[in-house]
Structure formats: C-alpha cells, structure tokens
Image (tube, rainbow, N blue to C red):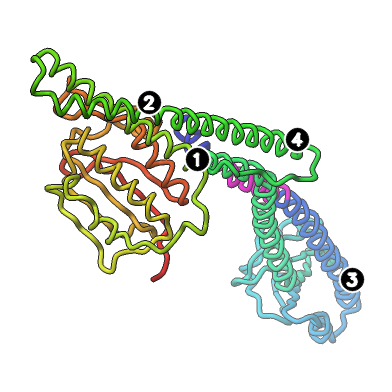
Amino acid sequence: MSGLRGRWESVSLRWRVAVAFGLVTTTVAGLLALGTWQLASGYMLDQRERGATNQAVIDARLVADSLARGSADLPTLLVGLTGEPETAVLLRVGERWTTAGRQVDVDDVPAALLRTATDGVPARQRLLLGDQPVLAVALPVSRDGDLFVQVAPLAELDRTLRFLSAVLVAGTVLAGMLGTLLGWWTARRALQPLSELTGAAARMAEGDLTARLPVRREADLAPLAERFNATAEALEERVRVDARFAGDVSHELRSPLTTMINAAEVLRRRRDDLPDAARRAVDLLIADVQRFHRMVEDLLEISRGIQAPHHHDLEPVDLGVVVENVPAALVPDAVIEVDRPAPIVLADRRRLDQVLANLCENARHHGDGVVRLGVLRRDGDAVLEVDDAGAGVPPELRERVFERFTRGARSGRTGSDTGGTGLGLALVAQHVHGHGGRVWVEDRPGGGARFVVALREVPR
C-alpha cells in the first residue's frame, strides 16, 4: 500500500489532478449511464412484453371462438395471426399440435410454461430459440386443456438495446476522456503561476538577476507576483551594491598591492644575500603577495561580471580553437579530444578563455593536473570537458565547489597550500551562467573528476 502511494505521489501534480478529474467524470457518467440503461431497457422491454401479451390474448380469444363454433377455417386463422415476421403460433387441441408462421419445435417451448397454462393460468417467458431472443406467451383456450402459444420475436428490441448500451458505454468513455483533458487543462492553468515562479527562481539561481514574474490581474496571484518581483529587485540591488563595494575595495587595494609586489620583487632579487631564516620569510611573503594579487584580480573580475555579457561582446567562437590555445604550462600532459567539425558557440571569447583557464588551474591545484580536454556534442549542446587525475569531488560537495571562497586540499598533497583564492570556480559558474549555459562536476571514468561546461551550439 505504501509503495502504491509512493508511486502515486511521484506522479506530477498536473497529471494527478487530470486523473482525478477523469475518474470523477467517468464515475458520474457511468452511474448516469447505468441508471439510463436500467430505466430505458426496463421500460422498452415492459412495453414490448405488454404489447405481445395483449396481442396474444386477443388472438387466443379468436382461436377460442373458432374452436367453440367448430369452424373449419382454423388453419387459415392461425396463418393470419402470424402477420408479424418471425412470429409463430402453436395450438394444442387434445394431444395434437398445430403450428403456423415461423417453424418452432414444440420441444423447444419450456415444459413449465405449458404446465402453468394447462392449469388455467396465463404465462409468458423470454427465451432463446436458436440464437434469437423471443417472448413465448401461453394461454388456455378451453376448459378441456387446449392451449394457445404465441412466440413473438425480440430481435429488434435486442438490437435497440445493444445500440443503446454501446452509446452509453461510448458516452461514459468519452466523458472520462473529456474529464481527463479538462483536469489536465485546469491543472495546467492553475499551476502555470507556480511553473513561472519555479522558472524565475531557477534563472535567478543561475545568475540571471533580471528574472521577473509577469503581473497578473487575478486577485489571488497578483500579490505573489508583486512580492516576488519586489524581492528580486531588492536582491538585484543588493548584489549590485556588493559587487560595487568589492570593485571599489579591489581598486583601492591596487595601489598598496603594487607597492607590496615591488617590495617583494626587490627582496626576491636580494634573496641570496639574506640569512636562511630571512629567506624563508621572504618566500612566504612573496607567495602570499602573489595570492593576494590573484584574489584582488578575481574580485575585480567578479564585480565586473556580475551581469550577463552584453550582446555586442558576443561572437561566434570555435571551441576547438579555444581548447587548442590553452597554455601548455596548464596542460603539459593532457590529451585533447575535439569533435570535428568542432561546435560553435556564441560567447565572449575573453570570458570563455578565462573559464577554461580557471578549470585547468583548479585541476592543477586540486586534481594533480589535467589529463584530458574534450570538446563534443551532448544532448544538443556544445560541451567542454576538463578531466583531472585527482580523487574526484564527493557528491555532497559538487554544488558547493562553485561557491565563492570554497577551497579544497590538493589531491595527494594534503598539508600544503594550494595557492588558490577560492574564487576560480565561482568565476567559472558566473561566466557560464551569464552565457546561458550550465556547469557541473561528475566522476571521470577511471577515477578523478570531470568538470563539464554546456553551452548552446549555434550553426556555422
């Protein structure tokens, strides 16, 4: 029971509502059809039986009068009483049976029906003669036990009832289908604001801070759209303020940072003249100054790239060329695999180069280097793959690695500083989302991590 409930809950709400509408309309239509069938079939059958019985009573009186007069025209009378097609009459006088009309074997008439009529009680019964439904009416015509039996066809009534049942069944099925379609349309209409909200939230999560909900006239939905849009605008403004602050701070840090870099360079040139303890201090100072410099540059890049690239900055870019132009120092032993012809994407070439460079730097610092660069097509997108030789990224961290200031230990070299700033993959995610693409990390076949960038391919 719980498994069935779980499977039912796994179905989308839209289809659950549609199925519920379909079941309700099918049930209602089925009950109405059943009631209509009971009333119509009962009425039609009762009318047919009454008509056949009344006709049999009249015919039996004519036969009784003929027997009482001793008329010699009795066979002619019996033939005249079978005016309706497929009708048969049977007359028992003493032990002798006379039939007219449709050929009917006396043995096919139920014995109980004949016994009841012999006892002086009129009787009728529906039965099958061959494969045709008929109504047999048995009436006594004399005190000596003479019987008159009239067999009336019910084939036309049977065809009518079959047609009525087919119409009612088809109407029930059609009502169920229309109910399902109505439920699907109603659910789609009712859930459209939720779908729009989900889409807008997803676009904002991917970095599109301009995503908004259309303002609706419905009294129940208008407040939702207005509040979401107000929240989105406040978030966009907050991000702009933070980006501007980061940019201002980075600019202000450039002057003292330049002084520090120049001083560190002077110390590096005179390193051999210093004692051993001072040399170690100078090495640590130079490493931290370099890292500080990269962090400031990354912060400036993030503050500049908080918005999607302008359309005039986009141009057709051959991903094969991008991969082949990666500096050899970043991928000294990497295998480069490119589909031919290489896919083309519409992108800002500078940002795309930075995406690939940051992924290679990440692999060098945290994955023991790049082992493969791939450019291929997957599910209609142009895909860029960067494989490393590290231990991979645990599933629970595959979203967090693209957050700012998330740093990992160097695979296989724990305990040493990786030299990363914690902003490289955040920049990758920001640039990719700004191009309308997707980026994720998965396991590389054979071990290690595979960072995947998917962008929309454009025709050559």
Q: Is residue 144 visible?
A: no
Residue at the disc numbered 3: 58
Front position among marks 2 and 4 = 2
Q: Nearer the viewer, residue 251 or 315?
A: 251
Residue at mark 2 to residue at mark 3: CA–CA distance: 125 Å
**Disc 3, SS:** helix
- Tell me: residue 16, above or below residue 317: above
Front position among marks 4 and 3 = 4
For residue 306, which numbered disc appears in the image?
1
Marked residue nearer the N-terminal end (3 or 1): 3
Image point 56% across, 35% down: which residue? 240
Residue at mark 4 to residue at mark 1: CA–CA distance: 29 Å
Marked residue nearer the N-terminal end (4 or 1): 4
Image point 37% across, 36% down: which residue? 297
Q: Which residues are magenta?
A: 11-28
For residue 233, which numbered disc appears in the image?
none
